[in-house]
Amino acid sequence: MRKNLTRRAVLRSSTATIALPFLESFGFRKFASAAEQVKSPKRMIWMGMGFGVTADKWFPNKEDTGTDYAFPSILKPLEKHRDDLSFIQHLMHKDSQDGHSGSTFWLTGANRYAVPGQSFHNSISVDQLAAETLGQDTRFTSIQLCAREAADSGSSGHGPGLSLAWNRQGKPVSGLGSPVEAFHRLFSDESTPLAERQARLNEQRSVLDTVMSDAKFVQKKVSQSDNEKLDEYLQSVREIEVRLSKEEQWLDVEKKQPDPAVIEPGESLVGYEEMGVMADLMVAAMQVDATRVLTYRMPVDTMIASLGAGISAHTMSHYSHGERRDVSEMRDLYNAKFLARFIDKLKASREADGSTLFDNTTLTMGTNLFSVHTLRNCPTLVAGGGSGFVHGRHLVMGDEKTPLCNLWLSQLKGSGIDVESFGDSTGVIDELVEA
Amino acid sequence: MQNQIAGWLALFGFAMSSFLSCALAEEDERAGLEAEAEMPEIHFDVLDKYCLECHDSLTEKGEVNLEDLSFSLVKNIETAETWNKVLNAINSGEMPPEDEPQISANEKTEFLRDLSERMVIARSVLSDSGGVIEMRRLNRREYANTLEDLLGVRPDVSLLPDDQASSEFDTMGASLFFSSDQLEQYLKTARNTLELALNAKAPAESKTVHIEPEDIFVPLYADLAVKRLDTASRYYQWRANGGSDDIAKEHGFLDGWQAERSINSFKSSYLPLEKWLTAPENRSGAAMMVTIKSGFTSMKLPQVRAWQPGRYLIRLRAGAYEDDPERFRFLEFVRKEGQNSTRLGWRKVNAALKNPEIIEFEIDHAPGVDAIYQVQKRSHMDRGDKNLEAVYRKENTYGTPWGIWIDWVELEGPLPVEPNESSPSIISEKPKDQSDDDYVRGVLRDFAVIAFRGEAPGGEFLEKLFARYSANRKKGQEMKDVLIGPLAIVLSSPSFLYMVESAESDESRDLTGNELAVRLAYFLWSSPPDAELLSLAREGKLKKPEVLAEQTGRLLSDPRSDRFVRSFAYQWLEMHRLGMFAFAGRDFPTFDNAVRDCAAEEIYETFSTLMHEGLSLKNFLKSDFVVVNDVLAGYYGLDGVDGHHWRKVALPADSPRGGLLGSVAVAAMGSDGQRSSPVERGAWVLRKLLNDPPPPAPPNVPMLSRFEDEILSVRDLQKAHQEQPQCAQCHEKIDPIGYGMENLDAAGMWRDIEVVTSGRKGSTKTEFAIDPAGSFGQGNDFSNFFELRDEVAEEIDGFAMSMTEALITYGLGRPFGFTDHDLAHEIVSHASGHDYKIEEFIHALIQSKAFQSK
């Protein structure tokens, strides 16, 4: 007990002096080796836009490649960061078939029809794979944010899923639906005493143990093929058990508060305002090293509504001319504004070693849908120094069907994750690291 | 009845005999389909001429080898995927590469037609489940119904994923996933619902809140008017003083620009306010005005809290402005929970302003939610109401017609509950001579047996449940509160969440009576079997064909079968499309939310009417009646339909209504909210009515933008499809059907002229005469909508097959595959002998071997 108090005291005092963001991440056992770790950790963020962009305006002109390209005028707010970001054209998932699913397979590259006798299949998403390595030492292995949109908005072009993330079994991972939820998960400490929280964990374990008892009972009764279905249930129980173990490790460590502190967001934030607050929370989460892997399924329907559009996101995505097109362009502009502000904040945040959050982050904004129902040339914008990419360029891949998974693989490898391939990748994109 | 049962018995015998020859037939079926999925050898010439130079076994450019590719598409998934690549590459124009010889138009059309049609067959063969019905979990609807059945409280399931998104039908086991979040959400939802059920407070005392709207709206509007006048007086003073930017601040404006804006806002909003405030009737009530800044004059009633569940009554006294168009005489009743609002219904005010009437509207307030109920005008999507206000104001200076004046509004409730309506008891009374522990063990066991739909839980499971109870009981909590934990565990266990059908092996076997009861109840009610079904199952009677038929009839006539009607029709006919696009209020002023909601309702109510009245499915293709309420009758221009209930109304002989083709729902689903779409309509008719689905739209085919800047009729726009072979091969079949529906505009209203709006705010209007001539299938030419409808009505067998395939998929919970072809034919041929009555399809499926075996 005494030890714990001391450690907590140390951790708490660090907020008062300078920000030592990675400190909190050391579980007790790693504390001794703290001195050895000087390099700031790698971080990865993906933000999915859902419905596609205004086709003829979003990307720079295809002939105009390299560093001196003319910046797309509807993305003007981003231009100040042009040296620190790259557009990549000609990336796609060859197996994507759903013209309304901009997010379902965006980070996975899976073929929906790959499994005989099933009408839906997915595989692990790149963020979850990254989190298996990058998330080991943080309180949250990964954080999924997911704008909550009205049920009849046609999912804003994101497609099936609960966030951008899919687990090892290809099942959807849920997301935090509002800034308030995200705030509480990341920063509010419970006032309940430690013993009570430990008791609650034990209680949760007993609950799992009890449902497992029924699961095993069913297992013995049903056929082989039904057992495969039941396996999803068993797997879910195991996942919760893993999470509970992690919670237990962190049970006596207070959640670290960013400096300056984030204020609890209001309940009513929606659309563009919500995006700003979500960005602030993501920055704060990384400042205190609560997590290193984040995804954000961005709002579309509520976003354009908050900007005064009188049409739904799906209606917008079928832009022709007139109002629908105006709204589509306005959305592109404000997404750019949002990203520019987010990058500002990442650049302004210092890690302990003097580098900025931006230097260590691999940031991607894009979607699986190019425009209307087109699934090739996925809009892709990458930024940040996390994967060692050389930025400031407009890359147009020679092969029009370069796997988007090649980018995911490049980012994984660039962030020090030991993988040979991802999805349908055929290799890394060498152009990204060559000047 | 006797005759009917004999018919079903005959069918049962037929099913038995056909079962014997079933294995053989299936093999034939597969062989037949495999032959159909064979690409004709002649197309090897196309590959040879245009593809093999790069994609032969030696070069394998892009790792694609077409030389050794099997022409049997169903050989395996890899073969099908390679052919799919070929299809997509040629469709999108990517192959052959630009600098290589191009496939001639004729060759291309035929190659693509053959290939895309064979892909459809190959997908169906390859995704066949081989007749296996996978164990499935309750979908979200079923879960909610089941919990309500067990606990008497409808759970809030908004946390759980909506299962309709990932597959064709939300009953398909293979697509009903499970994730760790879900398990936690099930536990949480069960706990919350159990809390509400077990800790139900004594019903709140009924009371009546009375509102005189003039008390609210006179001060509100007077205040607004004064503010507007103040703005105007400052503006004119500013103008008199020179009207420059420099002195704007002295007059309370930021700058000249803002001053001009303010006066415009005065001009548009003051007159309506003045008219309202000076109307004498608004001293003792309130007319339903639409304002630009403060929205509707809507009657918000006091919040009804989570702990005040029950039945409430909204009562109001209202009169109608007789000169206003009829659709302004409807009141819209709305429930608001946080951000979400739900329209509950509409009531028409018939009484004149001078002699108002009293209108009552009953609402059911679920426990556990805080909600506000309000009464308003009929609303439009998005900003439609505001845009329309401006349109009306241009005409009449005061904006949207008021339509209704309300004297007062009341909310009364919760109304006293009838004794037989009380909740099911979860926890029995404790006998005096029983120990606490024995009693609790009994409660847990009994609850688990009911929750597991009659299957006994495992002993170890029960012990662990009891251990959860006693651990917390020792901490000194109340018995009832402690029980919530273990009961919630029961409701989150696999035996509850999955429809468990035990099996020694993967071999098919007959269902037990109990399993049959479960499958039957979830098919027709989306909820668990009731006591009668379970006891028949226990006594071994349910599997007798005549008992099963009788029970099927009983379930269908129970109000719970409405759940089947709605979810089946919604998913089969792809009704989600109705909510996909926004219709601008300015372009479609009469297509408001009321019409859109009722348009969907018409389809369900028609299905229900056909089913309950023993009418033929043919009526869905063409009929001399429609099923409407007063809202929809108004939209269809049918006179003399009073009251909000749904009923059959005879149509005049020349009416385009009557049948799906002429319904507002189908027309609106086949549009993008602006213009009609012959492609969507034609493809829908092929898929749903003619059961001849065209290949799915290929991805990545460039949008035809050649005509983007030209103003053309919808029909002329489609001509672009005829220009390129890869488009023509499907569109020549799809588009002409859609042409026949061109007399129905995007919102389903009849038109003889197509008006295309363009320019800023739709100021330019161009008119085109409609040409509805077209054709479908072999030699079915039609010159107008009525001929199209007559010819489609001839194709009842195709339509019957379309519904049958959907019924099999929905009822058995697996994708319709070639394994099911025989079954489908049997069902259709049985139904055709009974005038295609909907209930006969259902009976035939339930009596089939497939439905009764695992």
Image: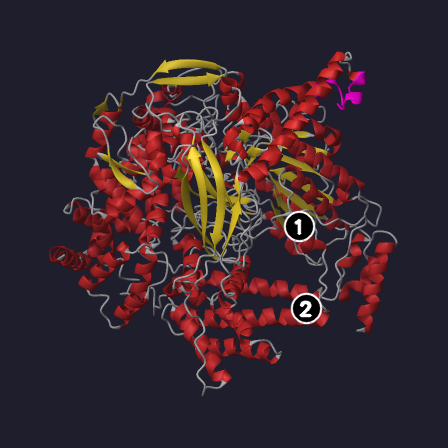
Name the mark on residue A180. Answer: 1
Comparing labels 2 and 1, the label whose residue is closer to the camera: 1
Label 1 is found on which chain of the structure?
A: A
Label 2 is found on which chain of the structure?
A: A
Amino acid, disc 1: Val
Residue in front for this viewpoint, B602 or B106: B602
In the rendered image, residue B150 lying in the magenta stretch gets the answer: no
* Magenta segment: B246-259
Do tags 2 and 1 sit on the same chain?
yes
Residue in front for this viewpoint, A179 or B678: A179
Which residue is tagged 2? A197
Name the mark on residue B115. Answer: none
- x and y percent of residue A126 in the render? 60, 48
Residue for point 20% across, 40% down: B797
**Which quarter of the figure is the C terminus of chain B placed in?**
bottom left
Residue for point 18% across, 57% down: B15
> Label 1 neighbourhood size at 10 Å, few (<14), some (14-19), many (20+)?
many
Residue A304, placed above or below residue B243: below
Q: Are marks 2 and 1 in contact (CB under 8 Å)?
A: no
Residue B174, placed above or below residue B791: below
The colour scheme is: secondary structure
Image-quadrant location for residue A49: top right
Q: Alpha carbon of mark 2 to alpha carbon of mark 1: how far?
A: 22 Å
In the rendered image, residue B250 lying in the magenta stretch gets the answer: yes
The disc, 2 or 1, on the residue closer to the chain's N-terminal end is 1
Residue for point 27% across, 54% down: B556
Amino acid, disc 2: Arg
- x and y percent of residue A400 in the render? 55, 31
Residue in front for this viewpoint, B485 or B405: B405
Residue B384, placed above or below residue B241: below
Residue A95 visible in rendering: no
**Which quarter of the figure is the N terminus of chain B placed in?**
bottom left
